[in-house]
Amino acid sequence: MEHFIPSLSTRMYGSTMLSIGLGVSNFEGMSANVCKSTSKRVITKEEWEKKLNDVKIRKEDMNKLVMNFLVTEGYVEAAERFHIESGTEPEIDLATITDRMAVRRAVQSGNVQDAIEKVNDLNPEILDTNPQLFFHLQQQRLIELIRNGKVEEALDFAQEELAPRGEENHTFLEELERTVALLAFEDASSCPLGELLDISQRLKTASEVNAAILTSQSHEKDPKLPSLLKMLIWAQRQLDEKACYPHISDIAKATLEDTNV
Amino acid sequence: MLNNEEGVSGSLNRISLAQLGWRRGPDDPVEEEEAPTYLNTKINCPFLVISTDKLSAQYNGDARHGYDVGAIQSNCPAPVRKLLYYFEIYVKDKGHKGNVSIGFTDQHFKMSRQPGWEPNTYGYHGDDGLLYHGNGKDGEPFGPKFTTGDTVGAGINYASQTVYFTKNGKFVGSAPKDVKGPLYPTIGLHSPNEKVDVNFGQRPFVFDIEQLAQEEREKCQAIIEKVSLPLSVSHWIVRSYLLHYGYKDTLASFDTASGNTIPSVLPTPQENNSLDIVTYALDERKLLRQLIRNGDIDSAFKRLRERYPQLVQDDMSTICFLLHCQKYIELVMKGMLEIAVTYARSELSRFFGVKYLEDLLQDCLALLAYEEPGKSSVGYLLSLAQRELVADAVNAVVLSTNPAVQNPESCLQSSLERLLRQLTACCLERRLLNGGQGEIFCLHKMLHGVKEGSW
């Protein structure tokens, strides 16, 4: 392991730390879109509301979207109940969600070895065909060992299981070095690499496994709803170039704001 | 007594069926757009000989000046409700000079000119490799020349509003122009013995158009995916959907599960009390939905009379009409036709002449005409979806009894529905302002993976 440590101090501080946090909302420039340009078409609130009313949205399509969200995000009980309450058929066998969620929970609670076994029980090809995922799981396992203060075990694991993979892949090696560097700090949580110990790292690994399992079940790895919401923001921006019309700028509230006033 | 006006403000008593999401039977079928399949020989072009299958052209003029070009268009313009249009020519013989061109022209185009020389026309010319677009004989450097044995393609990208060209399966380039349709695929020949074959898709193309379509879609998708969303807004919207429609059990499971796994990501109820508005009467709404979904309209009526008498007081209200219709439909479904007739006489006949309800009333009564109503054109009434529609309507009127609600019509739609309407309206409006070109956004097709000829 000697060859890991020396390179660390130089690389570690020089590298930019990527924050893993979830996207921050950015609505600037959207809500107060006053129509200055005269070349744009101005659509009044009344006209726009008429257009909105003319749109045909089927209830069953909305139900489908919600079911897709519940299934993809792994809300198995909610999906079952939604099936009963709304009559919407789940798009995949709900039992497979339970297995998938068990894997996810295992990673989220730090039982990585358990998670790896469960994934292999589900379908051994998932890890065989996805070296990056397997590496990230092993890396997470290393992180858990370090978190629990098992220094010797962590060192053995890093050298025996992870280092050989690092030799095959440069990115893996850098990741490995970054992770092992946690050992250099007495209080790892306060070190500059503390983010690796953060709960968000577990969530990140967990969602990576989740996506891989979904893909192996020929299911899309992401729910459709967030993409549609992004598409809404994008579509409004696109239309801004051509017209002035009432916006929905706060997606959570979903209320129409008249931008022409 | 009869009130034929739609949507009296201040209450949902006279709300139209359309506003409740009711539509008569299946969707209006979207008419197929005609696509070019052969060369249009109806417009006289004296300098060309066209093959009997109308897919090959040969020049037989003298090519002495700029007005004896042999140009020909396709039988109809390129379809516009697509992401891309594309066609190809194969240069069989470059003739004396190889003045072969391919491109697009509008309906005013003269067949004695090269595509690209006239306004609102575009042409890629084989003898010089230049692109001409409406500036007379001033072409601009574009791509390689083409000659005997080459396959050259021309297309329209409606997303970027450009025309693009290919040579022997390779993308040559596109012209950034505000392309405005309708445009006809066009070829131009201008020296003795020039001969080309046209492929409007009757044979596989040399160029991989599917691949281009996929790249275009992925490019667009990548831009959309970069948009950032407020933290866990999807959770929030799903939750408010469940609340809105009174899917109480689902909501409880959803809350429990999201509380366990991702406590930090769930939004806390916000300062505005929009949450309270939708938690309103949750148990009642859940119960009413169950009753209606089970076809137990009597109990639903009874419950409404007990809890929300104001909603069923006016026996001419839309909600009463919907419930009576459903009761009648349930009777038909059970095969109790005589009772159904009696019921219709006592409870439905008074709605005759109410304009905004007549479509549904007609369809309901039409059920009696069929031995197997389920297989008839009004068979949709017997589906679970019709019960769901009635349940949703009852849910909305119960929500509107909340004193905190200022505009009763706001109870008709969930946040999700408002967002999806806005999304659809924005996409349609943008398409309209782009000259009505490009794919028509349709949520239903998107969710069901229906692709219109994939490109």
Image (cartoon, rainbow, N blue to C red):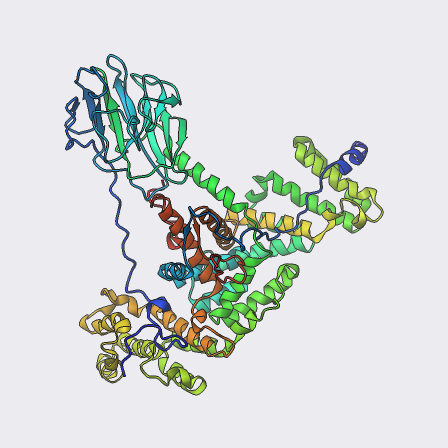
Q: In which quarter of the image is residue B176?
A: top left
**Residue A207 at x, y = what percent?**
60, 50
Q: Give B196 or B424, whichever is nearer the viewer.
A: B424
Q: Is residue B302 left or right of residue A10?
A: left
Residue A231 vertical position relative to residue A178 in the rendered view, above or below: below
Any part of residue B424 in sight: yes
Q: Quadrant of residue B116?
A: top left
In the rendered image, which quarter contains the N terminus of chain B? bottom left
Residue A195 vertical position relative to residue B113 in the rendered view, above or below: below
Any part of residue A98 in sight: no
- Name the residue located 22 percent from the left edge and 74 percent from the top edge: B365
**Residue A142 at x, y = what percent?**
73, 45
Residue A59 vertical position relative to residue B299 in the rendered view, above or below: above
Q: Give A66 or A127, whichever is nearer the viewer.
A: A66
**Residue A259 at x, y = what percent?**
49, 57
Q: Which residue lies furthest to the right in this view?
A: A186
**Residue A126 at x, y = what percent?**
56, 44
